[in-house]
Image (tube, rainbow, N blue to C red):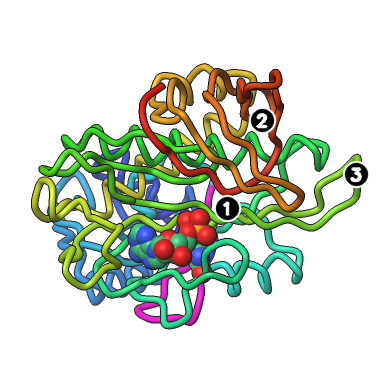
Amino acid sequence: MNETRRELLSSLAAGPTTGPALAEQLGISRAAVWKHVEALRSTGFEIDSTADGYSVKGVPAYGAAAIQYGLDAPYRIEYHDTIESTNDQARSLAAGGERDVVVVADEQTGGRGRLGREWASPQGGIWASTVLQPELPAAHVPIVTLAAGVSVARACQRVGVDATLKWPNDVLVETDTQQRKKLAGILTEMEGEADRVSWLLVGIGCNANIAAAVLPETATSLQAVVGDVDRRRVLQDILETLAELVANPEGVISAWKTHAATLGQTVRVETPRETIEGEAVDIRFPGALVVETETGSEVVHAGDCEHLRPA
Ligand code: BT5
């Protein structure tokens, strides 16, 4: 979506605005304003023309303009009905110099998890990758993965789903059977040098309006817990919290701890070098897990974590 369309949506979100006022604000002709309004109507926006100006009466369920409308985060939305992987598309935008753009899809045909694992991404999910350039050294990037987890957990809680966080990148929810299942996952990828991140991709996959039966056995969805949700609002919520936390990374650890499922669990963490077993006792900036083992305390920076039982 271009800058003019984005500005127009943000003016309309603030309240009814007349054609001449919009033309002046956007620095375009009144005829051009009318064309933009018609284009929005053709994507499903209901826009009335009243004495006060153009007034939005209805917003389409999903799509670039719908997600952009009323979004309180400094991101541009690029939307695809279907795509191989939003992270791949975000990567090519990042390589072309774009920042602060979110690639969103209704369906992915080649969704990826970490270490090349498959990520099931049928229609109805929230599949979104944000291209960022945070003011962080590369070593601090894990804080952004935690921030994304917090953003998803909060957005899920707002629709009535008690989501919790499993270190480092999973969002879980307890199902009827007292089992915890995976509701969402985060895939962070970056390019840069030790002291400077040139771009960072935050890929978020959240099983929203999807039947649990079409997901892996270990997964669940918002639909399975509370029924269909307004994906547009949920994604806006996620992006708004993400933007806020990325701008204030010092608040992320305490926010993460308030949703943590991992702390207080006996865990097994597989790192590239070893397997560590013990009680998960703390999370430390920029995102390390502290595990109390039989032989002492270990600080783990990356790995796959399995919850064995409450400690
Ligand atoms: C993750 O990997 O959890 C990161 C997932 C990131 C997906 C997003 S969607 C938007 C963006 N574009 C992409 O292509 N990717 C990102 P990991 O921790 O490696 O977990 C992967 C494992 O989760 C798989 O091996 C399955 O066991 C399980 N899994 C696969 N699909 C799932 C789903 N839809 N929901 C829950 N679990 C799933």
Residue found 47% across the figure and 21% down from its top: 257
Q: Which residues are magenta?
A: 75-85
Residue 59 in view, yes or no? yes
Q: Residues within 10 Å of mark 1 (few under 14, many from 20)?
A: many
User: Which residue was labeled with disc 2?
Assistant: 288
First reached walking from the N terminus: tag 2 or tag 3: 3
Q: Could you tell me the amino acid type at mark 3?
A: Ala
Residue 236 screen position, x and y as percent: 36, 46
Residue found 23% across the figure and 43% down from its top: 179
The answer as to whether callout 1 falls within 8 Å of ligand 1 is no
Q: Quadrant of residue 201?
A: bottom right
Residue 224 screen position, x and y as percent: 13, 54
Tell me if residue 190 comes above or below residue 30 in the rendering. above
Mark 1 and mark 3: Cα distance apart in space:
19 Å
User: Which residue was labeled with disc 1?
Assistant: 202
* Tag 2 and tag 3, C-beta contact below 8 Å: no
Q: Secondary structure at mark 3?
A: loop
Q: Could you tell me the amino acid type at mark 2?
A: Ala
User: Which residue was labeled with disc 3?
Assistant: 194
In the picture, measured across the screen, residue 257 lies left or right of residue 97, that is left
Q: Quadrant of residue 187?
A: bottom right
Instruction: Find out whether residue 82 is within the magenta segment.
Output: yes
Q: Secondary structure at mark 1?
A: strand
Residue 245 screen position, x and y as percent: 55, 30
Between residue 301 and residue 160, name the one nearer to us.
Answer: 301
Q: Could you tell me the amino acid type at mark 1?
A: Val
